[in-house]
Amino acid sequence: MQAQRHSKQRDAILENLCSRYDHPTAEDLYFSLKPQIPALSLATVYRNLAQLESDGKIIRIESGTTKRYDGNINLHYHLTCLDCGGVFDIFLNDDCGLCQKAAESFDGKIVSHSVLFTGYCPSCSKQAG
């Protein structure tokens, strides 16, 4: 297996992502980093996001047809707002026994899980009245 090269661009992408809580798209990250790294291409951002995800350093969130990314790899869940399309963190003390129930009802081996709630964020909920 070939060793992965160290990349300043990958480090910058990870640092930017870990400093955010808005679950940005690859394009959001690209436009955020482009002023500091003029040679950065969108393809480089996509390639490095895929590598970081493969390495277990970030999480990819499928929100409809949009892929968003999260630098917080600790166990938590997400809500996609049906109005504004934003993705928001939901932290629970435990998974309500979901993993245990799934493991008991499935004959195979579960190695990970992802839960995506849909609803309305606090701002959109207030506007709807």
Image (cartoon, rainbow, N blue to C red):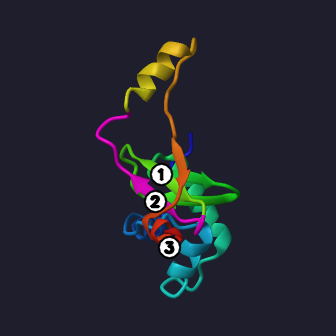
Specify the amino acid type for callout 2: Phe
Magenta stretch bounds: 83-95
Residue density around tag 3, few if under 14, some if 14–19, many if 20 or more, within 10 Å: few
In this figure, which residue is indicated by the disc labeled 3? 127
Residue 17 image point, x, y percent? 44, 66
The residue closer to the viewer here, 71 or 116, is: 116
What separation in Å lies between label 1 and label 2 (alpha carbons)? 5 Å
Helix, strand or loop status at disc 2: strand
Q: Which residue is mark 1?
A: 78
Q: Residue at x 57, y 74 (%)?
A: 28
Kind of residue at disc 3: Gln
If you read the primary sequence from the N terminus, does the residue marked by circle 3 or circle 1 appear first? 1
Asked if the residue at tag 2 contacts the one at tag 1, i.e. Cβ–Cβ closer than 8 Å, the answer is yes
Apparent side of residue 36 relative to residue 39 in the rendered image (left or right): left
Between disc 3 and disc 2, whose residue precedes?
2
Residue underneath mark 2 = 88
The image position of residue 45, as x and y in percent, is 59, 67
User: From the image, which quarter does the N terminus lie in?
Assistant: top right
Mark linked to residue 3: none
- Image check: 71 left or right of 33? left
Q: Is residue 27 above or below residue 1?
A: below
Residue at the image position 45 percent from the left and 70 percent from the top: 126
| Front residue of 38 and 99 | 99
